[in-house]
Image (cartoon, grey):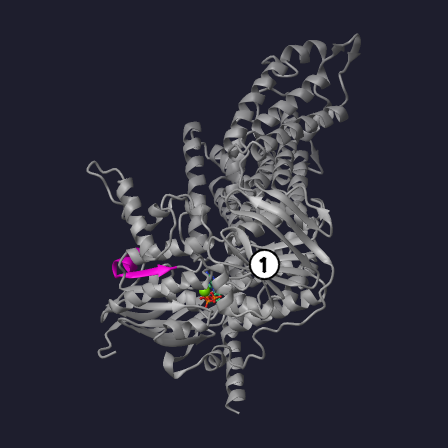
């Protein structure tokens, strides 16, 4: 008798405890949406501010400008995000862009004699495929060094970065490809399709922006819906648990660095199109920009957390900020100061918000 | 007890997490020289209450008095200075420091010129370990210790601070009876010196052994506080889960089938040597040993987690050659490791954690159906009563026992032929233990072979069809089902 009474009471109590949970579930949904959309909010605030501060900011041509500036960083940031979520960092993405674009540009504009055959200039299709192959190969080598050689990610990729910038200098002989002389005298231009990727547009929207959006979608899909994506989060979240659960850590890491290399090659091609030429030192500073984009977008440098959409907005914040500072006529030296401080500020704010609303 | 000096008093402590009202107006007091047992189901709020005392969580409201003086906000430093020491359920040692450094962290002995006095440090550490009657080398790195040894190190650290109030959150969950007895001796000694101890455990038989009073919590509230001698296990269970338990060890007797796992001459440098045994389908094989007997290392080697070993592991007559978890899982082996932190991916939600081992066998490009995955996880949330039953919640935010259930689910759903469970019910409450045992019985009944390593003698005797006893890395005896606790402990101990 007393038993059943007690039993009923306990059910009521339990429900009580979760009634609270049902209510705050609603507020926790709101909270977690706010948490995830932090970078989006930051971006909107920045855009609203700039649209008041400069009449030129919201014009069509300026927006196209921002998209062009941002797309390279965004493409690199997606590969970087995958790497960062596994707990690594890829400081060679800029160099990979330069090398793959340079190799492709050389092959697409010059002729070679190999064993008595005249080769090249190769077509656009081949150019792009070769650039991607170069990117993937360097990425895979990064992955092997990191995962098999057990060298810290940032040392391995920094070393790789120096190495392949050197190789790119050798390939291009230190000149832009095609160089000014080649372009004017021999009419050796980059194929028009490549130039279109950098400077053209589809129905008024920059082609490079379209490429970036495609890359973001691919990254988002991989992270959310594929086994690879799951493994990436698991390895970064708890390497031991991933190992005990049978996840092949070495293979996952190699693949992720390979993807990062591939994205870097795509970015390199687009960038060379925009510049009308490739050179060994292009995309300088893009490594750090891509890391900053990912982190501003919510990726955790310790691994286990981050996402493609967040990183896209991270890149947009960086691009918009640079553009805004230009519009506001801020002196170039000060621009650097401000950009650096803003990165620190945003990440500090993000940490604080996470602690505050930890849910 | 003649005079009851109140050391600690908590009134109307309240704490809400997003989604759960973890503590609802809790009142609790602690006398000098008493062992106050805190009892409650998984997720009742025990650890949360202790963490509020140790300063690692902030309370929403409520008052705390220590030695009659009201204390305001507590942070870890403040709490330590008030004489509160805590052994956390998820241990809080630094894995890359030595045992000695961990014990004296923040308080290292210095030489005249201000450098660490290593000699003195190691000597002092040795002494404090000896007082616990354990022989751990103080110079060992913590990450190379067994879970039980880590537990003892953490206990040594807290005891060394000479705290007035000790909070022990499941300090014995990885200890076997022998090590536990030594801990209890020490607790009695501290008790006689007037230290007040709050003790959390899911091992109900410990209540009579060590407890003075017991407070039962349920759903974030205090149900009752009773002197230990005025109550018994049944009454406590009743108060704790709000109903009677049907059966603590629901064992189904199944027909034992063909041999599915065979271990031949397995040795690993100074961990274990020459291990031979067979496991049949439908069989639950217990392995029992005291701390350091090698049972955990043996299990890890079989599963391919430690690869430096010689000998053979055969599943269904097929030799495992690669010795890595991925390959073992492919051959139908599954393993729950003793250390929970080696299993959970804290920032992923329940479904992702549950399906992790299944994913390891799928190709990278395979597309995951999120909906199916959720339904799948829900099945286990129901059958193991994972609480709160909200699956889109990161697993760090679950209580210790519920985390254990989540990792356990990972292997229950993996369609393995052989499962190795190292301390499967660690940190799980009484009702939950029965659920776990019921599932194990069902699995065995379906023809799966289970190796069960446990430091809890009653459960291993009740559940295992056969028990192997390990001592110093060797299998010394084999018992059939009808074995007494004394026999088992005797066989495992050194003489
Ligand atoms: N940081 C957190 N964020 C959100 N919820 C939490 C957090 N920590 C604990 N909880 C929730 O609070 C409740 C009480 O948890 P607590 O860890 O105190 O349980 P417990 O009694 O120690 O259980 P166990 O016996 O399993 O260790 C649980 O429902 C848990 O999910
Ligand atoms: Mg707990």
Query: Would residue A336 be counted in the magenta stretch?
Result: no
Up the image or down, B260 lies above or below A189; here it is: below
- Estimate the x, y position of residue B459 in percent, counting from the top left: 54, 68
Name which residue lies at 41% across and 73% down.
Answer: B207
Instruction: Please give left or right for residue B180 compared with residue B419 in the image.
Output: left
Corner quadrant of residue B322: top right
Rendered view: A11 above or below B460: below
Relative placement, left or right, of A338 versus A63 is left
Does mark 1's beta carbon lie closer than 8 Å to ligand 1? no
Q: Is residue B414 above or below residue A106?
A: below
Tag 1 secondary structure: strand
Q: Which residue is mark 1?
A: B421
Q: Which residues are magenta?
A: B76-87
Residue sitting at the far top: A116
Can see residue A226? no
Q: Is residue B78 above or below residue A137?
A: below
Of residues A61 and B206, the one drawn nearer to the viewer in this rendering: B206
Q: Position of residue B302 (x, y in %)?
A: 61, 49
Output the chain of dot 1. B
Q: Residue at x 38, y 44 (%)?
A: B98
- Which residue is rendered at x = 42% and y = 28% of the image? A333
Residue at horizontal 42 percent and vertical 53 percent from the top: B150
Residue A2, given in percent of the width and then of the height, sits at 50, 90
On the image, which quarter does residue A331 sit in?
top left
Quarter-wise, where is residue B71 in the image? Answer: bottom left
């Amino acid at each position: 008798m007393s038993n059943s009474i007690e039993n009923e009471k306990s059910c009521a109590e339990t429900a009580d405890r979760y009634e609270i949970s049902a209510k705050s579930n609603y507020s926790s949904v709101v909270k977690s949406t706010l948490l995830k959309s932090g970078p989006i909010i930051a971006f909107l605030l920045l855009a609203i501010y700039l649209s008041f501060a400069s009449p030129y900011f919201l014009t069509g041509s300026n927006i196209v400008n921002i998209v062009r500036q941002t797309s390279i960083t965004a493409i690199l940031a997606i590969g970087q995000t995958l790497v960062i979520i596994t707990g690594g960092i890829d400081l060679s993405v800029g160099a990979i862009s330069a090398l793959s674009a340079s190799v492709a540009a050389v092959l697409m504009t010059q002729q070679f004699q190999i064993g008595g055959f005249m080769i090249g200039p190769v077509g656009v299709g081949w150019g792009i495929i070769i650039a991607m192959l170069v990117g993937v190969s360097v990425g895979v080598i990064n992955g092997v060094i990191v995962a098999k050689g057990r060298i810290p990610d940032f040392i391995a990729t920094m070393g790789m970065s120096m190495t392949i910038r050197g190789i790119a200098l050798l390939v291009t002989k230190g000149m832009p490809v095609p160089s000014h002389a080649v372009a004017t005298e021999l009419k050796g231009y980059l194929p028009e399709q490549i130039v279109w990727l950098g400077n053209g547009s589809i129905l008024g929207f920059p082609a490079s922006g379209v490429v970036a959006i495609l890359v973001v979608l691919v990254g988002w899909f991989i992270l959310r819906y594929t086994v690879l994506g799951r493994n990436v989060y698991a390895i970064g979240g708890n390497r031991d648990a991933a190992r005990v659960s049978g996840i092949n850590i070495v293979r996952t890491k190699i693949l992720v660095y390979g993807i990062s290399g591939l994205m870097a090659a795509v970015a390199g091609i687009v960038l060379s199109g925009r510049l009308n030429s490739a050179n060994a030192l292009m995309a300088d500073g893009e490594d750090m920009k891509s890391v900053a984009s990912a982190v501003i977008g919510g990726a955790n440098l310790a691994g286990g957390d981050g996402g493609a959409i967040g990183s896209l907005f991270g890149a947009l914040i960086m691009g918009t900020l640079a553009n805004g500072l230009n519009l506001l006529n801020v002196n170039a030296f000060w621009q650097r100061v401000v950009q650096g401080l803003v990165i620190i500020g945003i990440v500090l704010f993000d940490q604080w918000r996470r602690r505050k609303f930890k849910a | 007890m003649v005079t009851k000096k109140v050391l600690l008093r908590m009134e109307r402590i309240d704490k809400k997490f997003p989604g759960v009202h973890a503590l609802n107006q809790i009142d609790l007091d602690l006398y000098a020289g008493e062992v106050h047992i805190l009892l409650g189901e998984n997720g009742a709020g025990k650890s949360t209450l202790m963490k509020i005392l140790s300063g690692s969580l902030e309370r929403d409201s409520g008052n705390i008095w220590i030695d009659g003086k009201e204390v305001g906000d507590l942070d870890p430093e403040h709490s330590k200075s008030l004489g509160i020491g805590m052994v956390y359920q998820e241990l809080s040692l630094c894995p890359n420091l030595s045992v000695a450094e961990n014990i004296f962290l923040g308080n290292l002995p210095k030489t005249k010129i201000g450098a660490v006095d290593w000699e003195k440090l190691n000597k002092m550490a040795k002494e404090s370990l000896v007082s616990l009657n354990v022989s751990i080398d103080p110079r060992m790195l913590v990450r190379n210790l067994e879970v039980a040894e880590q537990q003892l190190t953490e206990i040594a650290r807290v005891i060394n601070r000479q705290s007035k109030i000790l909070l022990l959150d499941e300090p014995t969950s990885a200890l076997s009876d022998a090590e536990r007895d030594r801990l209890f001796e020490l607790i009695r000694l501290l008790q006689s010196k007037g230290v007040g101890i709050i003790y959390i455990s899911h091992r109900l038989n410990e209540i009579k052994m060590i407890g003075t009073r017991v407070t039962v919590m349920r759903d974030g509230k205090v149900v009752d506080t009773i002197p230990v001698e005025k109550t018994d296990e049944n009454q406590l269970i009743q108060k704790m889960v709000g109903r009677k338990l049907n059966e603590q060890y629901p064992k189904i007797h199944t027909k034992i089938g063909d041999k599915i796992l065979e271990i031949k001459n397995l040795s690993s440098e100074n961990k274990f040597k020459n291990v031979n045994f067979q496991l049949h389908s439908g069989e639950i094989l217990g392995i029992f040993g005291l701390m350091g007997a090698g049972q955990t290392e043996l299990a890890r080697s079989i599963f391919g987690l430690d690869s430096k070993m010689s000998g053979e592991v055969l599943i269904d007559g097929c030799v495992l050659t690669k010795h890595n978890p991925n390959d073992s899982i492919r051959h139908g082996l599954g393993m729950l490791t003793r250390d929970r932190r080696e299993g959970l991916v804290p920032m992923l939600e329940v479904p992702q954690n549950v399906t992790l081992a299944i994913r390891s066998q799928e190709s990278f490009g395979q597309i995951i159906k999120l909906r199916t995955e959720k339904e799948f996880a829900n099945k286990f949330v129901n059958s193991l009563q994972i609480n709160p039953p909200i699956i889109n919640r990161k697993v760090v935010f679950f209580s210790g026992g519920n985390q254990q259930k989540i990792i356990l689910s990972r292997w229950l759903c993996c369609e393995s032929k052989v499962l190795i469970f190292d301390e499967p019910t660690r940190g799980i409450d009484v009702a939950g233990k029965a659920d776990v045992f019921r599932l194990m019985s069902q699995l065995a009944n379906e023809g799966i072979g289970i190796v069960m390593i446990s430091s809890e003698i009653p459960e291993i005797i009740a559940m295992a069809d056969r028990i192997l006893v390990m001592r110093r890395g060797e299998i010394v005896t084999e018992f059939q089902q009808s074995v007494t606790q004394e026999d088992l402990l005797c066989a495992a101990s050194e003489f």
